[in-house]
Amino acid sequence: MKSNKNNRGFTLVELLAVVVIFGIIATIAIAGIRGVLKRSKESYLDAQLKMVILAGQSYYADHRSHLPKVIGPIHEVDLETLVALKYIDPVKDANGVDCVTENGTNKSKVMVQKVNDKEYKYRGYLYCSGKTSGTLDNEKPVITLSPMKTDRVESRAVTVMLKVVDNEEVLSYRYIIYKDGKEYRDTGYQTYKKEVAIRLTETGVFQIKAYAYDTSGNASNITSLDYKIDIPKPECNHIFVDAAGVSEKTWQKNNVKITVSNRDSNIESWTLKDVISDNGASIATTRVLVKRTTSNERDFVLSLNGQHKLVIEAYNKAGESCTREVGTYYIDKEPPRILKIENPTNGAATSKPFSLKLTGEDLHSGIDYWQYRYNGTEWRTYADSSKNTFETTPFSAIRDEKVYIRACDKVGNCSSGSDSTHIHIVPPPPSVSLSQGHSFGYWLCATCRTSCHSSRVQSGGTCMLDKNGKYGNVMIKIDFSYNSNTASFHWEIIQGNQTFIGVKYFVGIRVIKDGISISDQRIKHESSSWGTSSHNSGTITVNNLGPGVYRVETYGNSQEPNFGIYYGDFTIN
């Protein structure tokens, strides 16, 4: 009978293979379980550390005076203190073992570090039964200064690079520069971000001491060797200005072209400033023509009106500077302005000479002279007229037209000449001079006889007769007036201290020019007792009188030879 192969069992090799596979699976499973347990314990410890850090933050919130004052250094509080002050309950590991001490040594703590003016960084370290959470870094940061020293005396600025590296992270740095053995500059602690350039720009012997902290509070420092620098000071008198023949402090009518040349190899750069002021201005305007140029020669054009004071600021390679005024140039391209022409006649006719009062201004070189002209004539210059306010010599010539006025400054700029005023001068009226005061003021003797002729002449007419032939003081007075070539003679018979009726025969008044009678007007006057009664006063007028010497006479009838008496004279100019 045949055997059934399908009922055959496992061989020994197959059984051994199965056992090995199960063993491998068991090993992997046990290792995984152990890893999970380990990670679980570590997670538990990390969670406990976070609680410890929160307790430390609460502690420093209540004790701010214990916080670090500068960036970098570490301040710390241990777990035992936090537990004792009730900021946290006792911390235990997963097995309930106290984490505070290990073999009587306190290892767990919270550390705080200032990272900038407003921010602090907290870290913690927890040690429990040989297990830890958090890290402790005991490696100091490494500081390098490059170059570390200069083997020769430098004649220019030196730049030293400060670099800090750390196995974790650099937090802050600080450096102090000593010059000639004395502290020169201290930066204080600052957050470190990248390599720092330290520039030494002055003459002297320098030394640098650098400090650094990492984020674990580890500190390090380094001191450089000497940097010896001797930089010549800039000499501003080695910079020259050429104005192409234009004199300084002399007013120019055109732009001024200048060339600035630097002839000092120690001058690395220079600045040119233009200080502009008007004539007499108290406030100046400063403009920068070029700033910190390294060119050895530059051209500039000065075109603005005013006084240009040029100032050089020169800098050497160390940044030291000098300042010097290198030139002053005056430019005036603007004519004066006429502000006012004062005409006392306001253009009305007058026969009297008069002056004009002129007022102007020039903000730059100043008014040098005033000029005037009439239509079709050349400009005429007033002497000694270099004033802002000037009174002209009197206008006196007969004319009726505009006079034009202009002002000119010291470089020849003149105002437009369109400013004007009207001049209207007419001939003066003839003047009259009397030989005997305001009026003739004489008393005229009438019908005087020969016997009293001498008395009449001496006393001016007291030899008068009344109708009865007796002497009296009856007189004739003539007042004279003149206007526009017309003379008026007002006559009046005056009675004195003798009683009488009238003058016998007063016939007329005669005006004689240069020996020739030009007017003969009769005024018949007789006493009432002798026949005809006439008026005792009146006025006669003589027209069209020209310049000359005149005589006035009165006369009676021809039977009285002494009746024609010289009365007075006057002159018309």
Image (tube, grey):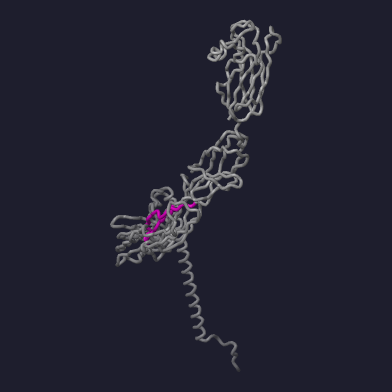
Quarter where residue 4 is shown:
bottom right
| Residue bounds of the magenta highlight | 309-331
In this view, which residue lies farthest toward the left?
181
Q: Quadrant of the C terminus?
A: top right
Q: Position of residue 264 (x, y in %)?
A: 36, 62
In the orientation shown, which residue stands out farthest toward the bottom? 1
In the foreground, 154 or 64: 154
Q: Position of residue 117 (x, y in %)?
A: 43, 53
Does residue 168 lie above or below 119 as drawn? Answer: below
Q: Is residue 466 above or below residue 511?
A: above
> Is 2 part of what is drawn in magenta?
no
Observer able to see residue 157? no
Say which of 403 and 166 sits in front. 403
In the picture provided, is 151 more to the left or to the right than 43?
left
Residue 511, quarter of the rendered image: top right
- Magenta region, mostly helix, strand or loop? strand
Name the residue: 35% across, 66% down: 146
Q: Confirm whether residue 58 shows in the render.
A: yes
Is 321 in front, or is 1?
Answer: 321
